Image (spheres, helix red, strand yellow):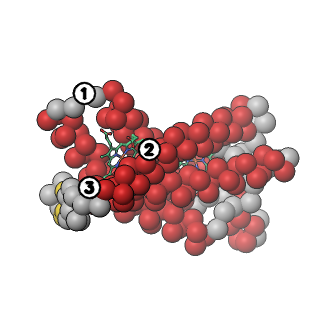
Amino acid sequence: MSPNLSKTTTYDGISRFNHWIIAVAIIGMIGFGFYLSEFLESGPGKGQLIGIQKAVGVLVLIFGLWRVGYRLKQGFLEDATVMPTWQRLTSKLVHIVLLAGIIVMPLSGIIGSYFGGRTTSVFGLFTIPAGDKVEAFSAMGHWLHGACGWLMVGALVLHVAGALKHHFVDHDSTLTRMIRQQ
Ligand code: HEM
Ligand code: HEM
């Protein structure tokens, strides 16, 4: 196989590492975020957990910038198999939504917090200062955070359903090439 062909049909180790680290982080953070906003009563314990959500979210943003930058630099791979046009387009659209979400989710959280006049301490390593309170920007950040969270859930359902269908129904290499060197 020529080097050029293998570059466009398999994920390198860095891509696979980046994909699964961010997958675990984003799924965990979405679950954690909805738990905080929908199921947890207000109180000091909640404040502490929100602090953890904010600190981990900033670390996810830092790693996410590297992960998204690496994909943009490399470009998307060719599909592992021949698919109908609607499936090809849906899969690409979902990948773009997920990549954008990796950045927009933490950034909108930071905007909501900053313009809400709240600091974000990242485990004592560094602190994002509080900005002047601007209610409209803070509300926009919070709204975007929630709306984008739901959009990510929808995209993820399609994404995981697609991966499972390729593996168990079509028996092609779409999932395995994201798991090991082909
Ligand atoms: C259990 C969860 C997940 C599974 C089983 C899964 C599976 C896969 C598979 C099989 C591919 C390769 C598709 C192809 O080459 O055509 C892929 C690519 C991709 N996945 Fe996931 N994924 C999961 C979670 C996530 C999450 C949480 C995100 C983002 C937040 C994500 C973002 C992406 C992106 C952007 C691609 C395109 C290639 C790349 O940039 O890595 N995935 N995923
Ligand atoms: C990967 C990064 C992140 C993901 C996936 C994520 C996801 C979520 C989700 C799904 C929610 C529930 C929906 C909502 O109430 O808006 C939420 C809540 C929240 N997130 Fe994030 N978040 C991330 C990072 C951040 C960051 C960086 C901050 C702030 C610096 C932040 C602050 C908050 C706050 C304050 C809440 C509201 C909790 C409540 O309503 O009681 N998040 N997050």
Determine which residue is flagged by label 1: 41
Name above or below for residue 6 compared with residue 157: below
Which amino acid does the dot numbered 2 rest on? Answer: Gly
Query: Where, by quadrant of the figure, is residue 1 drawn?
Result: bottom right
Q: Is residue 139 left or right of residue 94?
A: left
Looking at the rendered image, the disc whose residue lies closer to the viewer, 1 or 3, is 3
Q: What is the CA distance from the residue labelled 2 to the residue labelled 3?
A: 16 Å
Contact? badges 1 and 2 (CB < 8 Å): no
Q: Quadrant of residue 33?
A: top left
Name the amino acid, label 1: Glu
Quick one: SS at disc 3?
A: loop
Q: Nearer the viewer, residue 66 or 3?
A: 66
Cα gap from disc 1 to disc 3, whole angstroms: 20 Å
Q: Which residue is mark 2?
A: 146
Q: How many marks?
A: 3
99 left or right of 63?
Answer: right
* Nearest to the observer: residue 25 or residue 130: 130
Between 170 and 48, which is closer to the camera in this rendering?
48
